[in-house]
Image (cartoon, grey):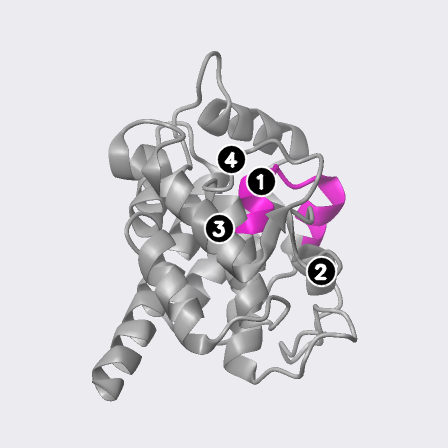
Amino acid sequence: MSDLFRQHGQGMMNHDLLSDQAREQPDGAGAPIFGAGTAVLDDVDQARADEYALLASLLITPPDSGSLARLSYLSDNSDTPLGRAHIALAQAAASYSHEAIHREYSELFIGVGRGELLPYASYYLTGFLNERPLARLRADMARFGIERAEGHPEPEDHLASVCEMMSGFACNHFAVSHDEEQDFFRRHVEPWAGRFFSDLEHAKGAKFYRSVGTVGRLFIEIESEAFAMEARQNA
């Protein structure tokens, strides 16, 4: 996965969920994904960081042949909608070639002029690109000391970028408080990410990426409910 962001005074994020999936143990216990410098996480936050990293990696670029092969080893023993979606994603990774997924990605997100879907907060919230949602996101990034890495021209409100930032919050790579993480989710993820993933599930050109849409939609629903429950408990 590309390193899209850094926080002032820190190095780039350095993780690759797809490559670490290949090192999972038979009982489903995954190897650590983040570097030795990362603070020790509980299982929930580690899983959250991994999920956001997976979604970011699949949205920013189509998986290459090696990543696709490793993704096919993704396992989930939980009998839950998200667990079943993980298994469906692994099956999809085993069913389509890199070349086919590359063509699908291009049709969905690039196209001639534009793709079938535009994974930007500004577009989903205003109908136009580079609007106030992007400005608000950049303001919060500046407040947290997060800046885009060189060589990544996509606007920061691309969903891959937002997911990578959420992964950084969950794994403590970016130093923000839990309340700030919750507020970031409420402001920049919850209003539109679930709708995008639902659109991806039902996109005309989606085959492999239909399973990505299902994983993303279910995960955002879980995140929304978890943050809402915390807010009710703290009210």
Give me the disc on residue 60: 1
Q: Distance between the Cα atoms at labels 3 and 1? A: 11 Å
Q: Distance between the Cα atoms at labels 4 and 2? A: 21 Å
Q: Please name the residue that numbered disc 3 is placed on.
A: 162
Mark with earlier residue (3, 1): 1
Q: Position of residue 60 (x, y in %)?
A: 58, 40
Magenta: main secondary structure equals helix
Q: Taking 4 as reference, is 106 left or right?
A: left
Give me the disc on residue 155: 4
Q: Please name the residue that numbered disc 2 is placed on.
A: 15
Is 24 or 122 nearer to us in this picture? Answer: 122
Q: Quadrant of the C terminus?
A: bottom left
**Mark 4 secondary-structure assignment:** loop
In this rendering, does residue 169 appear at all? Answer: yes
Image-quadrant location for residue 133: top left
| Point 54% across, 24% down: residue | 106
Q: Residues within 10 Å of mark 1 (few under 14, many from 20)?
A: many
Q: Distance between the Cα atoms at labels 4 and 3? A: 10 Å
Which tag is nearer the camera, tag 3 or tag 1? Answer: 3
Location of residue 212 with respect to 233 vertically, above or below: above
Q: Amino acid at mark 3?
A: Val
Mark with earlier residue (2, 1): 2
Which tag is nearer the camera, tag 2 or tag 3? Answer: 3
Q: Which residues are magenta?
A: 55-70
Magenta span includes 68: yes
**Mark 3 secondary-structure assignment:** helix
Location of residue 82 with respect to 205 vertically, above or below: below
Image-quadrant location for residue 10: bottom right
Q: Distance between the Cα atoms at labels 2 and 3? A: 16 Å
Identity of the residue furthest to the top in this view: 112
